[in-house]
Amino acid sequence: MSSTNLPRARNQTIARLLTRPTFQHNHDRNAEEVHFSETRPIQIVINGSATFHIPRHLLSRSQYLSSRLSYVPHGQRQEILIFGIEVSAFRIYAALLSEGKLALPFQDENDVVGQNAFWNIWAKCYALGRALRDTAFRNRLVDGAIAHMIRNDAQPGCLVRTIYKHSASRSEHRNLCRDLAMHTWRIPDILAVEEGEFKNDLFRDLAGMIREEGVERRRVDDFLVGKIGAYWEEERGS
């Protein structure tokens, strides 16, 4: 081989070496396996029956699921067993994680049975949000409730009961209940349906506003217009 061909031959050899498959050492191979495991869906088994396949990284928004993930080995079988929660509510939660949409079943405003069904599943989802310690999920649910109340110009009796039972003291979600009670003059109705253990909290939250003057009575939909996103709690998980 002539001296003039040496640079070209050397470059061709280097090119072949760079493109040829090579064996990685154990450290690199292990790192690659961990990365593959990170993208493999985790099986979430609810009440021993329903199974949901959700990518590991999507579960990190839930403080509860994040803590459970630390005990899930990186292997062939990666699953988390959860008992005592509603499958229908978790199905909505899983859809939100994977698709980014809160698929609450909005019903016809004149369908009383449908309205009851909507608020029943909404309450289950809100309770699930607390169990999973996912504040962002509960924030989305509050926005969904506001949108539904605007659409129907109505406030359900379960709203206060559900939020007070599954949220922290002086939370933004409780502020929504307080503001609705004051501005729509629904205080007697709210106190009538509220569970005794939460009445002291509710009285305290209302006390400051009750002393205010000039609170004009407003329709539910009129008061709530523009309030989407106004009652979001911090990402702390309560």
Image (tube, rainbow, N blue to C red):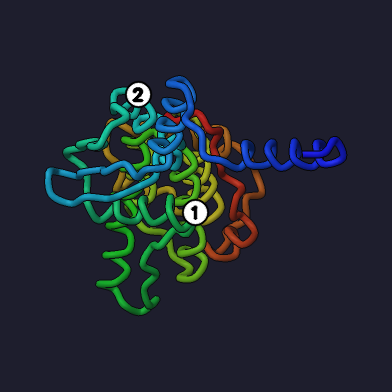
Q: Secondary structure at mark 2?
A: loop
Looking at the image, which residue sits at the far left? 48
Q: Give whichever of 110, 78 is nearer the camera.
A: 78
Residue 55 percent location from the top left of the image: 39, 44
Q: Amino acid at mark 2?
A: Ser
| Quadrant the C terminus occupies | top left
Q: Which mark is residue 185?
A: 1
Q: Quadrant of residue 76?
A: top left
Q: Is residue 179 left or right of residue 45?
A: right
- Amino acid type at image mark 1: Trp
- Residue reaching furthest front? 1
Assign a secondary structure to mark 1.
loop
Q: In which quadrant will I find the N terminus? A: top right
Mark 1 closeness class: few <14, some 14–19, many ≥20 residues within 10 Å: some
Residue displayed at 63% across by 41% down: 16
Above or below residue 188? Residue 223 is below
Disc on res. 210: none
**x and y percent of residue 119 in the render?**
32, 59
Does the image show residue 134? Answer: no
Numbered label attached to residue 70: 2
Residue 238 visible:
yes
> How many numbered tags mark residues here?
2
Tell me if 238 is positioned left or right of 89 in this view: right
Q: Nearer the viewer, residue 30 or 236?
A: 30
State which tag comes first along the sequence, 2 or 1.
Answer: 2
Q: In the displayed structure, would residue 164 be above or below residue 86?
A: above
